[in-house]
Amino acid sequence: MKKTVISILLIFALILSFSACLNDTNEETTQRQETTTAFQQTLAPIETTTLSSELVEPQEETTTDEAFAFNKADAVSLGKIDSEIYGTLTLYLQDDKIVILDEYKDIKFLLDANGYTTKNVESKVEVESTDLNFDGYSDFMLLYSETEFNTYYFCWIWNMAEREFRYYTPLSSIPSPQVIEDEDSILSLNRTSATQMTVTTYKWIEGNLVAQSHKTVTDEQQTALSESVDSEITFTQGGYTSEISLLGNVGSSSQWHCRIENEEIISLVASGFTEENAQYTFSITGMTPGTTTMIFRYALSWEADYVSEKILNVTVNDDYTISIVEIE
């Protein structure tokens, strides 16, 4: 009987131990599930947000040019330009867009007009076509502001690599630009008063417009600098004296001035101007055999900026005859 009781107690103890182990296992499994659920809840919003932002952006991209409809009745004619690539192009302004049509009346280019309007310059709504960057292709500009002293233009430059006109901000901000083709430069004549202006010279360097010089001049000085003069030299060999002649301009404030490097070799005997043929004449004589330099400048004065300059090597021979060689 006693052995039976002990056996029952042992079986009961084993049952209790197995139940306790089973409960511990269930609790651990539950905890792991709760932890996994919490971790998933932390990551889910980040993954969802990232995916959403990547999908939405491309759907929001639109092209405004596709919605533009050209209507000649609503457009302002800006004139024509001659393109080396497309021939004659006609420009219109509509809804702050510059519409460029080819000879077949098809839209070739649609450009942002950058706020250009015709209100301030209604009498001068006309495109100006010129080669602004001296690359051999026509560019164009539009007058958008005209003050008492200065004018301003919006400028578009032809980009051959991309085959399109591109708005160029630096040139569009220059007051009163002037294209000097034979010097591949652009002048800005910024008038600061009724009789004075600031002249800035620009050059294109590696595709950028760069200021090269900057000076303030009066109207008289600027007029002298802007005039042209025939700088061909005529030399007349004489006996005691020889003559060097250059052409000037009748009524101009500028004139030809002369300097001799060594007056012990060459002496200036006389100089004068004949209005009938606009000719300046310098009479010289040889003092002693040798060679010296003569410099001629067409300007308001020797110290002023000159329109043209000529430099000569002058030789007095042993017989005191004179010969000259022009230095380029």
Image (cartoon, grey):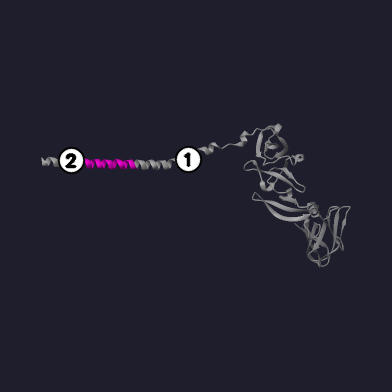
In the rendering, at what x and y percent does residue 109 appear? 65, 37
Residue marked by disc 1: 49
In the rendering, at what x and y percent does residue 262 appear? 79, 66
Q: Residue at x 19, y 40 (%)?
A: 12
Of the 4 image quadrants, the one containing the C terminus is bottom right
Of the 4 image quadrants, the one containing the N terminus is top left
Magenta residues: mostly which secondary structure?
A: helix
Q: Residue at x 25, y 42 (%)?
A: 20
Label 1 residue SS: helix
Residue span colored magenta? 10-31
| Measured Cα–Cα span from mark 2 to mark 1 | 58 Å
> Was residue 29 drawn as part of the magenta stretch in this picture?
yes
Residue marked by disc 2: 11
Residue placed farthest to the right in the image?
276
> Was residue 224 drawn as part of the magenta stretch in this picture?
no
Q: Label 1 sits on what residue type?
A: Thr
Q: Residue at x 77, y 55 (%)?
A: 217
Residue 177 image label: none
Q: Residue 188 or 15: which is nearer the viewer?
A: 15
Residue placed farthest to the left in the image?
1
**Label 2 Cα neighbours within 10 Å, binned few <14 / some 14-19 / many ≥20:** few
- Mark found first going from the N terminus, 2 or 1: 2
Q: Label 2 sits on what residue type?
A: Ile
User: Which image quadrant is residue 143 in?
Assistant: top right
Of marks 2 and 1, the one in the foreground: 2
- Above or below, 101 against 191 in this view is above
In the rendering, at what x and y percent does residue 5 appear? 14, 41
Q: Residue 258 or 224: which is nearer the viewer?
A: 224
Label 2 residue SS: helix
Q: Residue 22 or 69: which is nearer the viewer?
A: 22
